[in-house]
Amino acid sequence: MRDLLGGLAAIGLGLASFFVIFGWWVLIPTNISFLDVGDRAMHTLGWMFFRNAAWGIPPGASPHLGIELANSIALVDGLPLFAIPLKLIAQWLPTPFQYWGYWWLLCCLLQSVFAYLIAREMGARRRIAVLAAGFALITPAFIFRLTLHMALAGHWVILAGLYLYVRRVPPRFYAWPLLLGIVSAIHAYLLAMVLAIWIAALVQRLWLKRIGWGRAAAEILVGAVVAVIVLWAVGFFYTGSLGSYGFGMYRLNLLWPFISYRDWSQIIPDLPHGKYDYEGISFLGIGILVLLGLSILSGAVLKLKVLVGARWLPLIVAVVFLALCALSNKIGFLDQDVLTLPMGGPLDTIGGIFRSSGRFIWPLLYIVTIGSVVLLARRFSPGWSLTVIALAFAVQVVDSEPGWHAFAKNVPAPASVWPTTMTSPLWDRAVAAGYTRIRSIPVDVGFGSDFKDPGYFAVSHDMDIDIVYLGRIDDKALDALKAREADALLTGDFEPHTLYLLDDKSALAAAQRATPADLLATVDGHIVFARNGAFLVDGLGIAPHAALAD
């Protein structure tokens, strides 16, 4: 009964944190008002286009978002774990339909439950384990990621991997392959971290003779097959290249435990840091820093000598290796680069795939967070340690309030539509006249692109679009599209039934090939070109060739 109550307390804590941090309105299935900014818009548009597309090979393919650049629900970070099953029942779902609020709820619940279970396996009493779960829930790296890169906020899979590792009774055969399959349908970065923990778990169990070589080989085979099949199905291998820019920029700072990134402490000053070090945000929080300090002063850290034994050493090696990867080849201290290590060959390829290396600190971050609570609790009497840890937790909650409360204070009212700048009747007229595509010249892709309003209009009207923000883009396909654009401007060979959004230079080139029947005008801030589309502005007070005069 006490174990049940402890587990229910962890679930209740996760549930309470969700409603405090986000509020109930994100659970309204048709409420998309909170999803129209930044990467949240990217992920949501990815789901909208994927939902509307016919099934393809692989099942995660999404051919209409990006046209030649299109890839998959996995490579738009659209959470295939939810998106693919929901697409199966899409005809019975309302339009729009969002699942991100439910994902956030699941993340909060499982974040709390697995942190609780880890603390219990490490020897913590139930109430101490609940407090450890509370610290995991208010970890800045977790809350910060929830509203930025939503699928990547599934930190509970890291905790699930750590739980399978620390279990005193080895998990059943299916446990690791099941976890690998689940995380493969969430995010590749999380998969890489879970894989490292899994390898450590295999070494640990072999070292302690908990499994034999035959069982280990079977687990490796089944786990690898499951992961590869899921990765293929969700479309992770859809493009010719998974590399991108940014390795060495999105890194972990050497002072990662103490850099509060402004919102996460009102007491500790915001130390200077690199512009892109936010990818490695891993501030411990003032409560955990206090508990670590007390552990050092009291001598509780002397118990850490057990880490060099067979049970813990493989895990420590794995998480320290990940932490070193998080630093990247450009070591940052405060806002300075202090060392640059040479790269080449396979390392460049791996760095391109995992460009935001700072994220790899997360397994070590959670071990330090949960371990600090358990370590101090085992050093002192139950009553004294419970009081001190509860007080530290309360202080951290209050101190980090600007960070964890930011979303709830700024979330817009529920709405089933996004505000848009594309309000002219021209756009609906184009759809009625049979225009089925929106393109941009030059191609407008990636972070900083004007993807949201055109993308939202396109998906709402069953149009294809090549203005996209995707997690990965095939470089060869992008080069081919750029060459096609250049040829269209040079020869005037523009696609029929396509709206082109041009910049000033492209508009001047298009004007040289325009006919009296074409449209070349500025509409809602966009320079629009449409072959044989002059009639689209009839009666709107817009001259069909107004952009030429501009």
Image: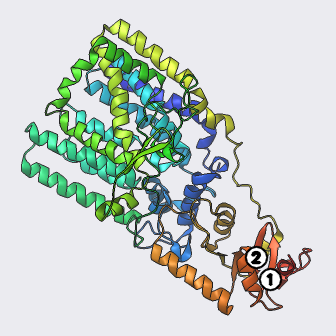
- Identify residue for label 2: 528
- Identify residue for label 1: 519
Write down the quadrant of residue 455 in the picture.
Answer: bottom right
The location of residue 221, given as percent across then percent down, is 18, 58
The location of residue 379, given as percent across then percent down, is 28, 13
The location of residue 338, given as percent across then percent down, is 41, 44
The location of residue 431, given as percent across then percent down, is 73, 76
Residue type at the position of mark 1: Leu
Residue at (57% x, 53% y) in the render? 39
What is the distance, in whole Å, between disc 2 and disc 1 at their CAs?
7 Å
- The N terminus sits in image quarter: top left
Residue at (42% x, 54% y) in the render? 81
Residue at (58% x, 85% y) in the render? 484
Q: Given contact means CB atoms under 8 Å apart, are the residues at marks 2 and 1 in contact?
A: yes
Residue at (67% x, 86% y) in the render? 489
Secondary structure state at the residue bearing disc 1: strand
Q: Could you tell which of marks 2 and 1 lies nearer the N-terminus?
A: 1
Whether residue 495 appears in this view of the structure is: no
Residue type at the position of mark 2: Val
Asked whether, in this view, residue 318 is left or right of residue 412, the answer is left
Category of crowding for the residue at label 1, using alpha-carbon neighbours closer than 10 angstroms: few (below 14), some (14–19), many (at least 20): many
